[in-house]
Image: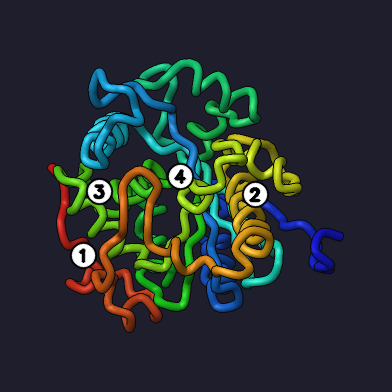
Amino acid sequence: MEGGLANPAAEVRQVWASNLEEEFERIRSAKELYPYVSMDTEFPGEIHTPSNKQYWELSPSERYEGIKANVNALHLIQVGLAFATADSRPSLAFEINLREFDPLVHPHNPKSIALLADSGIDFDRNRAEGVDASRFAILLHESGLLGNSGITWVTFDPASDFGYLVKLLTARDLPDTLSDFLRNVGHFFGNEVYDVKHMIRGLRFLPGKLEDMARSIGVKREAGSSHQAGSDSILAWNAFRKLRDLHFSQTGVRQFVGVLNVLGPIPSGCGINSAAAATGDGSGSSSNKPPVGGN
């Protein structure tokens, strides 16, 4: 029983078109009980590189150029959301399977698609039974998760994850500039965001990949398999909690809040109107519109 906690391992609920509305009722209820939401996505890899420089030589703006080119060209495959309290393992997780991506038609990185298929993602089933991305965006707007000051987001190296979600939520390409993109992230997700990859930058003895890093600190995968968004969102939360308690018990983790690995800080004070977020008002009022957009 890890850390003396008695709660059972999280259930990963598979979300398809047939149960989408029912599962979003559970998501809306979960946000009232669990103030921490861990998020992960799966997408078709990368097909563009921003420049001929080595990655470590790139500025944040140059890295964003690469993220933007890939996100604008590709389709989101899965979104994972795991809900937890501050001192517990996730009690509930959702894996939303989207239908838009077709590996026979759409651009992708073949190695990434092979890896996802080996991990259990059934692209044929996603096409046949998956969630329509526009409907998912509407329900996410209406869920009360966005711009909710009572929710803290936990992620692992989420620059592309947020890129795909911003594209989904705005129904347009990503903004031209990094600063505008970060304002969009702040608008939808607020500033209470922890990026575990950013947290471990100073812990150079830890591996840089989620699975390897979690294993090195004694965190096991509780459900599902790697490269599936629901399972990875659970692993990211459990790794965050273990790092917080093991390595940052004295200094705390507030020093890391609101900063995305490789891109920089999310501007504060640009979230959705808190009243609209609290009531889940996704009606398209001006308070829920992004501050800037893409093409």
The Cα–Cα distance between marks 2 and 4, rounded to whole angstroms, is 13 Å
Q: Please tell me which residue is depicted at 56% across the width and 27% down the height of the picture.
A: 116
Q: Position of residue 281 (x, y in %)?
A: 33, 75
Q: Which residue is mark 3?
A: 171
**SS type, badge 2:** helix
Do callouts 2 and 4 mark residues in contact (Cβ within 8 Å)?
A: no
Q: Please tell me which residue is depicted at 71% across the width and 47% down the height of the picture.
A: 217
Q: Nearer the viewer, residue 294 or 180?
A: 180
Q: Residues within 10 Å of mark 4 (few under 14, many from 20)?
A: many
Q: Could you tell me the amino acid type at mark 1? A: Lys
* Position above or below: 19 against 251: above
Q: Which residue is mark 2?
A: 235
Mark 1 or mark 2: whose residue is earlier in sequence: 2
In this picture, residue 70 sits left or right of residue 233: left
Q: Quadrant of the C terminus?
A: top left
Mark 3 or mark 4: whose residue is earlier in sequence: 4
Q: Position of residue 85 (x, y in %)?
A: 63, 72
Q: Position of residue 103 (x, y in %)?
A: 44, 21
Q: Nearer the viewer, mark 3 or mark 4?
A: 4
Mark 3 or mark 2: whose residue is earlier in sequence: 3
Q: Nearer the viewer, residue 126 or 117?
A: 117
Mark 2 or mark 4: whose residue is earlier in sequence: 4
The Cα–Cα distance between marks 1 and 3, rounded to whole angstroms, is 11 Å
Q: Residues within 10 Å of mark 3 (few under 14, many from 20)?
A: some
Q: Residues within 10 Å of mark 2 (few under 14, many from 20)?
A: many
Q: Nearer the viewer, mark 1 or mark 2?
A: 2
Q: Nearer the viewer, mark 2 or mark 4?
A: 4
The Cα–Cα distance between marks 3 and 2, rounded to whole angstroms, is 29 Å
Point out which mark residue 289 bears: 1
